[in-house]
Image (cartoon, rainbow, N blue to C red):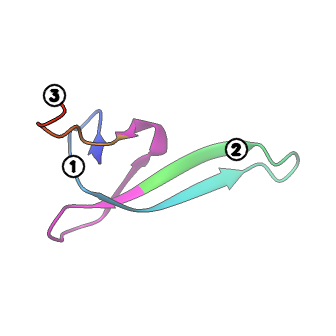
């Protein structure tokens, strides 16, 4: 996966979605990623994360 703003790539390891208690509508989604091969986890808004396009597809 790639963060479309920072261009950092990594593996998506989790997603947290927060919903409003009053109506159940989605408030925000946060993606948790780690670099391939290990390293420090980081989080970004889920809407900024996209699959990495392989060179074979490009």
Q: Which residue is mark 2?
A: 26
Q: Position of residue 34 (x, y in %)?
A: 27, 63
In the rendered structure, which disc, 3 or 2, sits on the residue that comes first in sequence?
2
3 or 1: mark nearer the eye: 3
* Residue farthest to the right, as pictured: 22
Task: Determine whether the residue tagged by mark 2 lies in a helix, strand or loop.
Answer: strand
Q: Point out residue 22 in the picture as x, y percentages from the top left corner.
A: 88, 48
- In three-dimensional space, the C-alpha distance between marks 3 and 2, rounded to whole angstroms, equals 34 Å
Element type at marker 1? Answer: loop
Q: Which residue is more in the foreground, 57 or 26?
A: 57
Work out which quarter of the rendered image holds the C terminus and state it: top left
Residue located 35% across and 39% down the image:
50
Mark 3 falls on what kind of element? loop
Q: Residue furthest left?
A: 55
Name the mark on residue 58. 3
Describe residue 21's horizontal placement relative to residue 5 as left or right.
right
Give the x, y percent position of residue 36: 18, 63
Separation of disc 1 and disc 2 at Cα? 26 Å
Residue 9, numbered circle: 1
- What residue do we see at 30% from left, 34% from top? 4
What distance separates the C-alpha of mark 3 from that of mark 1?
17 Å
* Mark 1 Cα-neighbour bin, 10 Å: few <14, some 14–19, many ≥20: some
Residue 46 among magenta residues: yes
Crowding near pointer 2: few (<14 within 10 Å), some, many (20+)?
few
Label pair 3/1, CB-CB below 8 angstroms: no
- Sequence-wise first label, 1 or 2: 1
Instruction: Give residue 18's mark.
Output: none
Q: Are marks 1 and 2 in contact (CB under 8 Å)?
A: no
Few, some or many residues within 10 Å of mark 3 (<14, 14–19, 20+): few
- Seen at 28% across and 33% down, the residue is 5
Left/right placement of residue 46 relative to residue 22 reads left
What segment is highlighted magenta in the picture?
Answer: 32-49
């Amino acid at each position: 996966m790639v963060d479309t703003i920072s261009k950092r790539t990594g593996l998506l390891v989790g997603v947290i979605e927060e919903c409003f208690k009053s109506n159940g509508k989605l408030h925000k989604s946060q993606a948790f990623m780690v670099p391939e091969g290990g390293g420090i986890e980081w989080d970004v808004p889920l809407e900024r994360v996209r699959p990495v396009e392989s060179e074979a597809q490009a």
